[in-house]
Image (cartoon, coloured by chain):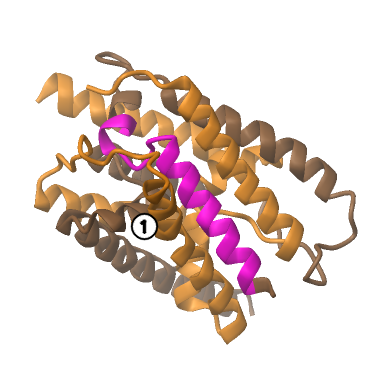
Chain colours: A brown, B orange
Amino acid sequence: MPLIFSLLAGVIFGAGLTLSDMVNPARVTNFLDVAGIWDPTLIFVMAGGLAVTTLGYKFIFRRSSPVVDEQFHLPTQRQIDLPLIGGAALFGVGWGLAGICPGPALADLVTLEPKVLVFVVAMLVGMIAASALRVRIDAMKALRQS
Amino acid sequence: MTSFAPVSGLIGGVLIGLAAIILMLTIGRIAGVCGIVVNAMTASDAAGRLWRLAFILGLPLGALLVTALGLKDWSSITFPATMPTTIIAGLIVGVGATVGSGCTSGHGICGLSRFSMRSVVATVTFMATGVATVFIIRHMI
């Protein structure tokens, strides 16, 4: 049952990325090009997404639990720290370089364009490397505190 | 050149929001693509990996569905970054999103919708460095 819901959510998410043209790197880089041929479409994508999600979450969180799980799984971190800012800063550089972020990269696989596949593989390598490093850092911190 | 497309942008955005609320209402999860992909590879339990793989599989399926309905013309879409730039961009997007606990969807849609201060800071930061990167590439080099 959870699988059907997450597949459905993925399909609708991918359809949204495609309809809004976020799968088009030029659409993204032109949005980021505020000093040149600025294309504000991405603002409308975010506005649509935020309006629906903010309102939807408001109603969903009145429930004590989701429909097919015992609890909501929400991020617990609160502090504004260096990994958050440094990671986001790096992410933005990569986003600006190729005009692709993780969701559109996966939807773009349907183009069978070799560069998309290369981007996705490089992204997975980066993710594995970063999470392995994080696990080690957390382990070292725990060791120092014990 | 891309022509300003507010209506299709808004409709696509609404669909992305719909996907986010379906995932939260049904299984209580954040629709952050980066977090889902990372945990699809690292989760220790099979169920934790499976729902994430189903979501990931859905992304290209959604793109195919829109195309099959005749609502998408891919002919004008190109990937202008060179192969070396694409590799570097992919690597730093992967590292940055993992270290920064989220990407455009996780922080930019789900986090902001929960009024998370971390997500506000992350979204402003990656927008700023994205703008700076494109400015350097297009107007300085």
- Please, what secondary structure does the residue beneath circle 1 have? helix
Which residue is drawn at the image coordinates 24% and 53% (left, top)?
A: A111
Which residue is drawn at the image coordinates 64% and 45% (left, top)?
A: B18
Left or right: A29 with respect to B62?
left
Q: Which residue range is magenta in the image?
A: A3-28
The spot of residue B120 in percent (x, y) is 59, 35
Report crowding for label 1: few under 14, some 14 to 19, many 20 or more residues within 10 A (C-alpha): many
Left or right: A59 with respect to A124?
right
In the rendered image, is residue A100 in sight? yes
In the rendered image, is residue B45 in sight? no
Which residue is drawn at the image coordinates 61% and 50% (left, top)?
A: B19
Count of all numbered marks drawn on residues in the image: 1
Any magenta on residue A65? Answer: no
Quarter containing the N terminus of chain B: top left
**Dominant secondary structure, magenta:** helix
Residue position marked by numbered label 1 in the rendering: A106
